Image (cartoon, helix red, strand yellow):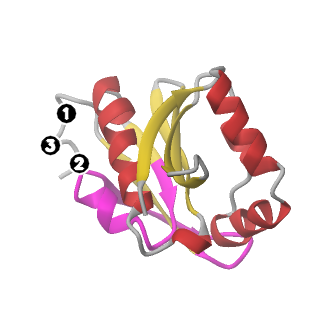
Amino acid sequence: MRQWVITLAHGQPLYADLLDGIRNDRDLVAAMGADAESHPDELDLPGTRWSVALLEDGTPAAWCAARTEDGTLKCHSNYEVRAWRGRRLYEAAYHARHRDVVHPSGLAAVTYLFDAPIGLHEANGWRRTGQTGCGVTGHQWWELRRPAAGDQHAGR
């Protein structure tokens, strides 16, 4: 299985085309809600950067996004399509977001995650804040933060 990863900015034609394809797949939208309490509308906000792992035919298989809110980079919409799990596609999208968005921004960042991707984030300097809760589908989530560039030892 061949794949490629691309980071797109809200407003680009390919961004809109990929997002429309996800929106039109009712089963996928339902799975996103059940698995990650996520919805495609979260991606349809100006200023959003979206890293997407695409299959050879251009089908989105995993993704994550980020946008700046109140001077903090909010990382969100972390998802891997059920049929493609176990192939490290989310990991590829995550690394693209880190390389193309998180690291160059230099901003402090926040994300809210269920258990599966936490280790991947912690390996890149994210730390659990102690904030946790239970989502609407019963999943346990944790808040993780990453300090701004130049402040990498804050909170340790």
Residue at 17%, 39% in the rendered image? 152
Image depth: mark 1 or mark 2 in front: 1
In this rendering, the answer to whether 120 lies above or below 15 is below
> Mark on residue 155?
2
Q: Position of residue 105 (x, y in %)?
A: 35, 25
Residue 151, disc? 1
Q: Which residue is mark 3?
A: 153
Q: Is residue 91 left or right of residue 40?
A: left
Q: Are marks 1 and 3 in contact (CB under 8 Å)?
A: yes
Query: Could you say whether the residue bearing mark 2 is in a helix, strand or loop?
Result: loop
Q: Is residue 79 left or right of residue 153?
A: right
Q: Distance between the Cα atoms at labels 1 and 2?
A: 9 Å
**Residue 44 visible here:** no
Seen at 44% across and 59% down, the residue is 90
Left or right of residue 148, residue 82 in this image? right
Segment colored magenta: 111-139
**What amino acid is at disc 2?**
Gly
Measured as percent of width and height from the top left, residue 102 is found at 35, 35
Give the spatial CA distance, label 2 vs label 3.
Answer: 6 Å
The residue closer to the viewer here, 49 or 67, is 49
Q: Name which quarter of the figure residue 72 lies in.
A: top left
